[in-house]
């Protein structure tokens, strides 16, 4: 991290809705988590009186099976954002430029600047056509947040090869990839895949994730990661969750069906962006974004004002939840 960059950057607060009586469609996390998690957590909490073993063998093995890579290529991190910071920290020096997609996750900009780098913004749907040659790193969000569209796997792999040939590290944020049937770039030479267990397994407060890389890039990530990067509960619950393949499949099917049902309903009033993710982005048109947000709030529902994303000025994003919850949202927005 570049100490000189800190004077220009403050801390950005994140978090969900503090009022638990509000139905939160602003955060894209699974409303369900796998059965048995509480028992695993309780056992791990008892074991937390001792330091965790820093090799995280069980966690790495589970992660390797989950994304299809060798366990040794897995670098445990406290969530997906920690994996992103770690990847940029070993790739970007002060003065370097980094390709950053927009509209996309706003933390990419901040994390690049924390390393003293300069974000070079490119439209997310043109990111794979960009020339990686002049840049120390390139970032891709797959599927992209907040638009929800996933990249064609062959085009993404071709871009990864171009990045490798140019000596540019490719950072692929795969926080929502497990909601799709697209292959991970985990284990691809020259690329870092950043994964989060927050979204699929509905445990955002646990802070568990990992990065995947090969060769010298993996060695640098492993050398730079904090010792005891994961607490025992996060490591044990994370390893357990990644083995729940039936839960993942059931979640994918539910999200896919509900997303299409919600899209069709919302499209009667709004311009809805196609999505492969557990959320939908829509343009409110001539309406005020504030009016749409307020209308939902009056019915006890929080939605995401997406105008905070670079390049969006009339958009709202909503998560895909369970059918009864989705019905409440659709009813609240029907007459806006």
Image (cartoon, helix red, strand yellow):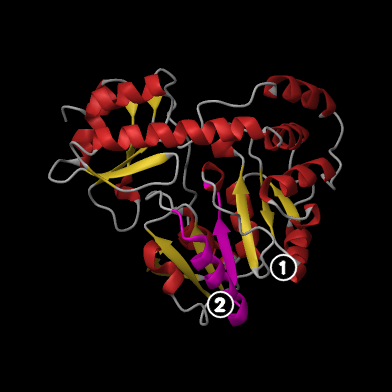
Q: In this view, does 156 lie to the left or right of 69?
A: left
Counting from the top left corner in percent of width and height, residue 76 is at 73, 49
Image vertical order of residue 198 relative to residue 144, above or below: above
- Which of label 1 and label 2 is nearer to you? 2
- Location of mark 1 (residue): 217
Counting from the top left corner in percent of width and height, residue 122 is at 39, 68
Instruction: Look at the image and give the residue range highlighted in magenta.
Output: 150-176
Q: Is mark 2 on a helix, strand or loop?
A: helix
Q: Residue 313 or 285: which is nearer the viewer?
A: 285
Residue 73 visible to the viewer: yes
Q: Residues within 10 Å of mark 1 (few under 14, many from 20)?
A: many
Residue 163 is inside the magenta segment = yes
Residue 162's disc number: 2
Q: What element carries label 1?
A: helix
Counting from the top left corner in percent of width and height, residue 145 is at 43, 50
Q: Residue 20 or 253: which is nearer the viewer?
A: 253
Q: Is residue 261 left or right of residue 216?
A: left
Q: Quadrant of the C terminus?
A: top left
At 41% from the left and 55% from the top, the residue drawn is: 104
At 56% from the left and 59% from the top, the residue drawn is: 172
Q: Is residue 294 left or right of residue 195?
A: left
Residue placed furthest toward the left: 286
At 39% from the left and 48% from the top, the residue drawn is: 146
User: Residue 267 falls in which quadrant of the image?
Assistant: top left
Image vertical order of residue 195 relative to residue 219, above or below: above
Q: Residue 195 or 50: which is nearer the viewer?
A: 195
Sequence-wise, the earlier of marks 1 and 2 is 2
Q: Distance between the residues labelled 1 and 2?
A: 17 Å
Residue 228 visible to the viewer: no
Residue 1 is inside the magenta segment = no
């Amino acid at each position: 991290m570049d100490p000189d960059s800190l004077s220009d950057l403050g801390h950005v607060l994140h978090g969900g809705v503090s009022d638990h009586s509000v139905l939160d469609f602003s955060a894209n996390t699974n409303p369900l988590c796998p059965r048995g998690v509480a028992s695993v957590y309780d056992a791990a909490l008892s074991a937390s009186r001792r330091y965790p073993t820093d090799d995280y063998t069980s966690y790495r093995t589970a992660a390797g099976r989950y994304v299809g890579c060798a366990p040794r290529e897995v670098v445990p991190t406290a969530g997906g954002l920690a994996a992103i910071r770690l990847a940029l920290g070993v790739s970007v020096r002060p003065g370097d430029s980094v390709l950053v997609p927009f509209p996309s996750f706003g933390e990419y900009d901040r994390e690049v600047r924390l390393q003293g780098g300069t974000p070079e913004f490119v439209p997310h749907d043109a990111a794979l056509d960009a020339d990686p040659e002049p840049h120390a790193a390139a970032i891709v969000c797959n599927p992209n947040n907040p638009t929800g569209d996933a990249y064609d796997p062959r085009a993404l792999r071709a871009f990864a090869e171009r990045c490798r040939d140019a000596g540019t590290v490719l950072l692929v944020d795969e926080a929502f990839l497990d909601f799709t049937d697209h292959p991970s770039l985990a284990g691809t030479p020259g690329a870092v895949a950043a994964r989060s267990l927050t979204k699929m397994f509905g445990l955002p407060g646990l802070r568990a994730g990992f990065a995947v890389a090969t060769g010298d890039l993996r060695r640098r990530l492993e050398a730079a990661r904090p010792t005891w990067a994961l607490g025992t509960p996060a490591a044990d619950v994370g390893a357990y969750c990644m083995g729940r393949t039936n839960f993942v499949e059931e979640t994918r099917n539910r999200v896919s069906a509900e997303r299409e049902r919600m899209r069709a309903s919302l499209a009667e009033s709004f311009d809805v962006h196609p999505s492969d993710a557990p959320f939908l982005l829509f343009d409110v048109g001539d309406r005020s974004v504030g009016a749409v947000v307020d209308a939902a709030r009056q019915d006890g529902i929080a939605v995401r004002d997406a105008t905070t994303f670079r390049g969006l000025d009339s958009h709202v994003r909503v998560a895909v939840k369970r059918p009864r919850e989705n019905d409440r949202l659709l009813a609240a927005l029907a007459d806006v």
